[in-house]
Structures are given as structure tokens and as C-alpha cells.
Amino acid sequence: DADVTQTPRNRITKTGKRIMLECSQTKGHDRMYWYRQDPGLGLRLIYYSFDVKDINKGEISDGYSVSRQAQAKFSLSLESAIPNQTALYFCATEAGQGRTDTQYFGPGTRLTVL
Amino acid sequence: QKEVEQDPGPLSVPEGAIVSLNCTYSNSAFQYFMWYRQYSRKGPELLMYTYSSGNKEDGRFTAQVDKSSKYISLFIRDSQPSDSATYLCAMTYYTGNQFYFGTGTSLTVIP
């Protein structure tokens, strides 16, 4: 969905490196999410943000940090990448503001940590 | 115990078959139920969205929610090779709350 974009789409890095994954959306949604997807484990929530001043940890936030630079931008950082952070990472958005809605996903970033 | 359980498959069916995909859940407070379809190397895309119990139909797809059994289903009629994808169920208590996802069922429709 072009409304939610992620960069880069693929990244190979080495253990110990700092990595930033970026997400931008043109849907005008308040809420943004970062998930990782691993085979057999499904989608697991890393962090989420309900507005620019709101950041919340998900179930697997250790080793990750986020920044909500603007309503449309939400970035995920791996301060010191490790091999078990190799996964497919998805950004998602949701309208919020009391509206019944669902989450819309970006195309994903495939991250490999060697 | 996971909040949401989904058989990972893989499921392989001939073209034209009726496909049944299912999820069970443990928390009776879930009110909103969704099915996402994820093609290889793509992000999940919303397929069906239902509130509370009952059925919802959209073309060849029917979503069913049985809250008394804590069981949701997605039926695909006249399955096509283009339906080959991973299907994820998701649910939440109310809008704005965390989503809980199943692990996904991999479906292949053979021409």
C-alpha cells in the first residue's frame, strides 16, 4: 500500500551496528506501530505511538527504540544490532480518534544481521 | 497460552475448492475481528473486518464469528490460484487497543 512506505526495503548489517528503519504515511492517521514478523511467531508488537507526544512499549521492545518525528513519520532504531533481530519489520497505521478502524501495513523491511 | 491460536498449515487445495481458515482465542473481551491476507514479500492487507458475532460476506469471502465458542472462520469459495497467500487473523477489544494476531495459515491453491 503506497499510503504507508518503509525504507529501506532490505538491509544487511553486522552485529553491533546501529540501524534505523523509517516509516512514512500519507493516510493522515494518528496511530503508528512497529511489528516484527518471524516464522512461526507471527506479528509481534515492538512499539506504538498514538500521537507525536505518545510512545509506548509493546511486548518485545528490548533492544529497540523509536522516534515519532511528526504525525506522518515513525522510525525504529536498533542501537546495537544482534543476529536474533534478523526478521521482517512492518510499520502500520491506524486512524484512531475514536473511529472504528483497522491497521494498514507498509510493505516491510527485511533486515539481516550477520 | 497464546491469546490467539491459528493453525499454520500449510494448506494446499485444488482450484475451485472451498477453503476454511480458523482461529481460536482465549479472551472473551475481544469485540473486533479481522482477517488479513499477506502475499510473499508484501505487508498484510485487510481482507475482512467484523464486529462482534455473526457473518459477513464480501464476494467469495465470508467471515464468521462465534463468540460463544471463541472461534472465528474465514471461508473462501471457488478458490483461485491468486488466493495463494498467508492469512492472518487479528482481534482487539475495542478501537485503539492493541491488536492480537494469529501466526498465519499458509494457503496454496493449485491450478
Image (tube, rainbow, N blue to C red):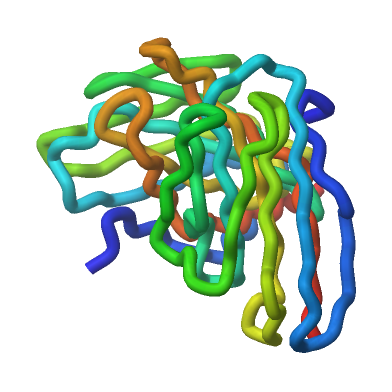
Quadrant for the N terminus of chain A in the image: top right
The image position of residue A112, as x and y in percent, is: 80, 76
Toward which corner of the image does residue A26 lie, by quadrant? Answer: top right
For the point 59% across and 16% down, the residue is B59
The image position of residue A48, as x and y in percent, is: 49, 44
**A112 in relation to A22, above or below:** below
Q: Is residue A92 visible?
A: yes
Left or right placement of residue A48 versus residue B52 in this view: right
Toward which corner of the image does residue B80 lie, by quadrant? Answer: top right
The image position of residue B52, as x and y in percent, is: 24, 22
Q: Is residue B79 visible?
A: no
For the point 74% across and 27% down, the residue is A25
Viewer-side residue, B75 vs A48: A48
**A96 in relation to B99, above or below:** above
The image position of residue B94, as x and y in percent, is: 28, 26
Viewer-side residue, A99 vs A19: A19
Left or right placement of residue A63 versus residue B24 in this view: right
